[in-house]
Amino acid sequence: MAENDRGSGRQREWKLKKGMDAFGNMFGLNICFVVGCLPVFTIGASLAAAYAMAIRLQEGEEETIVSGFIHEFKRNFKQATLGFLGVLVVVAVLLAEWILVNTQTGALSLFYTIVFYLELLFLSLTLAFFFPMIARYHTTLKQAVKNSVLLSVGYVFSWIKITVAWVAPVVFSIVYPLIFFYTWYLWLILLFGAIIWGTSHTIRFVFKQNAEALKDSAEAAAEEEKKKEEERQQLENAKKLLEDNRKSQKKGSGGGRKRALEPEGAGETADAEDAADTDKKPAETAQEAPETKNPDRNRNSQSKSNQNRNDHNKNNQNRNNQNRNNQNRNNQNKTGQNKNNQNKGGQNKTAPKK
């Protein structure tokens, strides 16, 4: 029991300390914001600096308020001031359209009413995240407007909370000016800082969720691109293999046709040429053989072609030897006949006269 009481007491102390720190931060931010808004045209830069400091204090990135506020005020002064002047121009246009709506009647009044509410909706969608976007990210005014509208549309409930937090006190003070008369000093010391501090929690949540979504989408896009690249590589490899197989088949069929059309040599010169070809062909075929995925088939075809050449050469040699033997026999027969004729002539010469 004693340990539980100590734990609950420490938790209360921690919550009290955290609440006092938040109150002190809201008070310091409110004073800095009000002082920064005194020249009026610097309201945008002061609001951006206040949001930047609120987010940094909540994330534990900053401990001092005044020096950090001055730094953020200087850094965002130009961009935030131009953005604020643009907002003033839009507000002036809306007021002029509101006057036209109240003075015109009929279809023209309906047209201006529709345009007025559409522009008012666009302005509210932009303002919810416009100055925090300038304070937190390095971006242009055009990109800040675009991203603010996208965030407001993508996170509708967060946009409603931020809009109500800013618009409700202003509308309440305009509708009940007497209450504002008795509580105006609270705006100078606390209320602006409290609204900025409270809406910063929602803005931080939206920025964090959006960053995670962008990271996931980038990873998904990278994974998809990787898969597409692998598929392209596989298709290219398949096409290359098909082309290599076609080339090898064409070369094999062309060599077979050439060998089928070659005439059979009958002389010694043809035999010599065939023998030279048989010596040269294996080396040439070894150099010109393409790299395919069926080396056994190429080897078998080469061995068969070499065997056919060797058989062809043997047949030519046998024919040549047979021709030579026939020629020798003919020569021997001729010489025998010549000798017999000589012997007969000698006998006739030596015979006595009658």
Image (cartoon, rainbow, N blue to C red):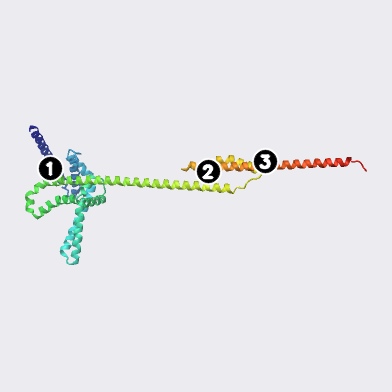
Task: Specify the label residue 27 is tagged with.
Answer: 1
Can you give x and y, in whole percent of width and height, for residue 3 in the image?
Answer: 9, 32
Q: Amino acid at mark 1?
A: Phe
Q: Is residue 298 left or right of residue 227?
A: right
User: Residue at left 47%, top 43%?
Assistant: 294
Q: Residue furthest right?
A: 354
Point out the frontmost of discs 3 and 1: 3
Mark 2–mark 3 Cα distance, whole angstroms, equals: 30 Å
Question: Which image quarter holds the N terminus?
Answer: top left
Labelled pair 3, 1 in contact (Cβ < 8 Å): no
Q: Is residue 314 left or right of residue 68?
A: right
Name which residue type carries label 3: Asn
Looking at the rendered structure, the kind of residue marked 2 is Ser
Q: Which residue is mark 2?
A: 301
| Nearer the camera: disc 2 or disc 1 | 2
Q: Of the two numbered discs 3 and 1 on the same chain, state the one appearing first in sequence.
A: 1
Question: Would residue 132 be found to the left or right of residue 288 on screen?
Answer: left
The Cα atoms of the two marked residues, 2 and 1, are separated by 94 Å
